[in-house]
Amino acid sequence: MKKVLVSIFVLAIIGGAILIFIPKTQELIGIDTGPPLIGIQPYGSIADQEVDSVKNSIEAMYGFEVVVLDKKEMPEMAYTEIRYPRYRADSLLKWLTYHHPDTIDIAVGLTNQDISITKYKGNTREIKDPEWMYKDFGIFGLGTVGGTSCVVSSNRLHKNVSDKTFYRRLMRITCHEVGHVLGLRHCPEANCLMNDANESIKTIDNSTGDLCADCWADVR
């Protein structure tokens, strides 16, 4: 009997440790772990002013604590020359998932290098037409819905626009990608920040810069 009681006691301690110290377990059983801590991962020569604007925009929109991590060089494993010298956004997301401090809940990669993905037809693995364009398609940012990371590039945001427009675009795209990580999918509401850019920066420019009421209700 004594051995049984000891075994039960040990199992109770292990179970309690799992509930307290593993965030995913806490989330699955509904324990409130508090707001996420967001870490911005600056890459390469990204300007400090761009990093600061992104930090301020996340804090202002979502009210979460945001910290800036030490700058790192772009991961070589994400580099591609399929069409142009640039970096694969999906590879950057994978790298971010495994290369950020354990204290960070959400990692936001920030670069001034061009980033790209492959675009497919619907839910298939068939590349959109024309294949030469969509096999390695340049994008503004990418975030995993309900994941732990997103990446944003400022590379395509500054052409023939004022600094004011550039920073507004950068902040909106960042908050859009963070929205994906928080569980939001693209929204059909035209003026909502989570509306799909549909390969055009004009969608970002025409947005209100805020989430619609439905998206705010779904932020986890």
Image (cartoon, rainbow, N blue to C red):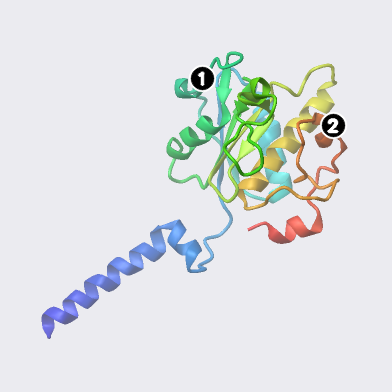
Instruction: Identify which amino acid the numbered label 2 is placed on.
Output: Lys
Asked if residue 44 is positioned above or below residue 187 in the image, the reply reads above
Using the image as rendered, state which of residue 190 and residue 68 is in the foreground: 190
How many marks overall? 2
Q: Which residue is mark 2?
A: 202
Other-residue count near label 1 (Cα within 10 Å), few / some / many at <14 / 14–19 / ≥20: some
**Whole-Å distance between the Cαs marked 2 and 1?**
28 Å
x and y, in percent, of residue 32 in the image: 54, 65
Camera sees residue 111: no
Using the image as rendered, state which of residue 154 and residue 2 is in the foreground: 154
Other-residue count near label 2 (Cα within 10 Å), few / some / many at <14 / 14–19 / ≥20: few
Asked if residue 3 is positioned above or below residue 45 in the image, the reply reads below
Q: Quadrant location of residue 218?
A: bottom right
Asked if residue 130 is positioned above or below residue 84 in the image, the reply reads below
Could you tell me which residue is drawn at 84 percent across and 16 percent down?
A: 160
Q: Which residue is mark 1?
A: 79
